[in-house]
Image (cartoon, helix red, strand yellow):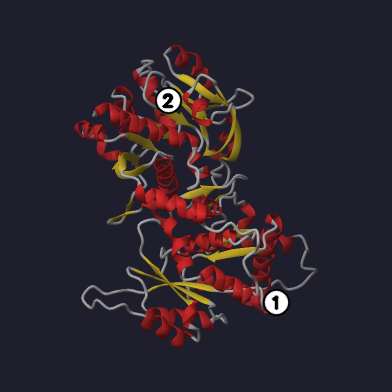
Amino acid sequence: MSGVGKGIAAASIGRILISKGYAVTAIKIDPYINVDAGTMNPTEHGEVFVTEDGDETDQDVGNYERFLDQDIYSINYMTTGRVYKSVIERERNLEYGGKCVEVVPHVPEEIIRRIKAAQKHSDAEIVIVEVGGTVGEYQNMLFLEAARMLKMQNTHDVQFVLVSYLPIPSKIGEMKTKPTQYAIRTLNSAGIQPDFVICRSERALDEVRKKKIAINGNMFPDQIISAPDINSIYDVPVNFEKERLGDLILKQFGWTEKMTAVGLKDWEAMVNKNRQATKEVHIGIVGKYFNSGDFVLADSYISVIEAVKHASWANNALPRIDWLDAEAYENDESKLMELKRYDGIIVPGGFGKRGVEGKLKVVKFARENKIPYFGLCYGMQMAVIEFARNALGLIGANTTEVDEKTAHPVIHIMPDQVKNIEEGNYGATMRLGAYPCILNEQSVAFNSYDQKNISERHRHRYEFNNQYRQQFEQAGMLLSGVSPDNRLVEIVEVPNHPFFVGVQFHPEFKSRPLKGHPLFNAFIKAGLDQQDLKI
């Protein structure tokens, strides 16, 4: 089933193989017709993760970056739409030499070509390929066919890992293996025999069930890997190593651990340190991409969540995160008082009108009550609008994304984006990827990074309106980060505040578990300092 942890399993295997001295990269395959993840609804698909080179990808690419501790580029991400688009373009360019272009073999061949191109680009010795969705889905057939063909072409160089869920029905209390047995047989029907089965469940797999799955799956018991629920995804590589998964994978390849292997000592030290933290830091995240039917989808902001974790751990603290619905504050200002219980407030990225007035009330409350505030992308724009209305006295100030006729468009559309909006061209047309920024040496941002020149990833269409720069500066707002040509305001700050910073970029995309992002580290530290003042 989807959401069972394939991305974390793939990333964890990558972390393990790196620890054994091998160069590793990872590829995500999405079965959607969408050319990229940029046009997908976050409450249905989860976060859109942006790469250094500006690709809008699946959230699992973020997991790869965090676990492998390396940048993953657009060449490592493919969708059904992207693959078909390439095949059609090649056919139009006569690159098939007049052949009848068919779904098989030409589409699977394009998939294989892309896998090999990603390997060449990163010079990896091992490429981990995650196929999204589930076994047996019609939309995955071509990717499984590509996998089968790749195995036929490189018999000893390809292994298959199936991630399957073993339910424990509450009224029965017994772990059931039958769904996994059928998943293996379904995979067999595509011409693929798994080399390993990672068994996800509430509890650890016992030897009896390992043998049962092995017998029915035409495998050996040591190929059945137990993957019980745990408190932190960063424990997964450590748990896999208890099952010797890394050594077993290398053995299948006929390889051994390299002399240059560094092991998982730094990773284990990070995990153990996090377990030992006793101080708590309470963070409220105010957004609107939460509701998915009767459930809350935290994956909409997964990189923000992980960045908060990394920064909390860097400050020897445990994060306690609450989801705060922006719309709840629009009509009930008394609810704002609950914000005083938090050590810090984050307004993350987003789009559209819904929940905007609630976010603005939250920003005002955090600014006036000295609660550390961190605005990310749209959260920075909310900080600018709130300051314009309540510090500059610009009544009705807004972003033209929300109100095209506002008298004070303190946030407006980037000039080169006007044509895209008029033509309804939204896919991959924003300001995307890494851009440089120069910091004011008297700012919180500079003190956080401890350097003047930085580079961060963007995903937006709207910018700070330069016509209002002087008014903001005269009213006390510090425009602490700008583009090298001084055209774009990238960071705003409110001085004489414990921490009030808004950034036009997405620092969460560059946070790693072994080293938290400088701005998130500073934000969490400010929250803990305020916590101490309350005592």
Task: Give the camera-side residue of 172 and 125.
Answer: 125
The residue lying furthest to the right in this view is 97
Name the outermost residue toward the front. 259
- Where residue 55 sits: x, y (%)? 59, 48
Answer yes or no: is residue 328 visible: yes
Q: Is residue 396 above or below residue 65?
A: above
Please give the label number shown on residue 63.
none
Query: What distance separates the C-alpha of mark 2 from that of mark 1?
Result: 57 Å
Q: Which residue is at 55% across, 31% downward?
A: 414
Q: Disc 2 vs disc 1: which is toward the camera?
A: 1
State the SS at label 1: helix
Asked where in the image residue 454 lies, by quadrant, the reply is top right
Residue 529: x, y in percent? 34, 29
Where, quadrant-wise, is the N terminus in this rendering?
Answer: bottom left
Hey, which quadrant is residue 263 in on the image?
A: bottom right
Whether residue 402 is visible, yes or no, is no
Tag 2's secondary structure?
helix
Residues marked 2 and 1 touching at CB (< 8 Å): no
Q: Quadrant of the C terminus?
A: top left
Name which residue lies at 42% across and 84% down.
211
- The percent coordinates of residue 131 (x first, y second) are 53, 66
Give the amino acid type for the residue marked by disc 2 in the picture.
Val
Query: What percent of the width, then of the height, locates residue 32?
Result: 52, 62
191 w.r.t. 1: above or below: below
> Counting residues from the N terminus, which is met first, the one under dot 2 or under dot 1?
1
* Residue, far top: 474
Picture layout, residue 503 above or below residue 475:
below
Residue at 34% of width from left, 35% of height from top? 345
Q: How busy is the neighbourhood of tag 1: few (under 14 within 10 Å), some, or many (20 plus)? A: few
What residue is at 42 percent from the left and 15 percent from the top? 476
The tag on residue 384 is 2
Q: Which mark is residue 153?
A: 1
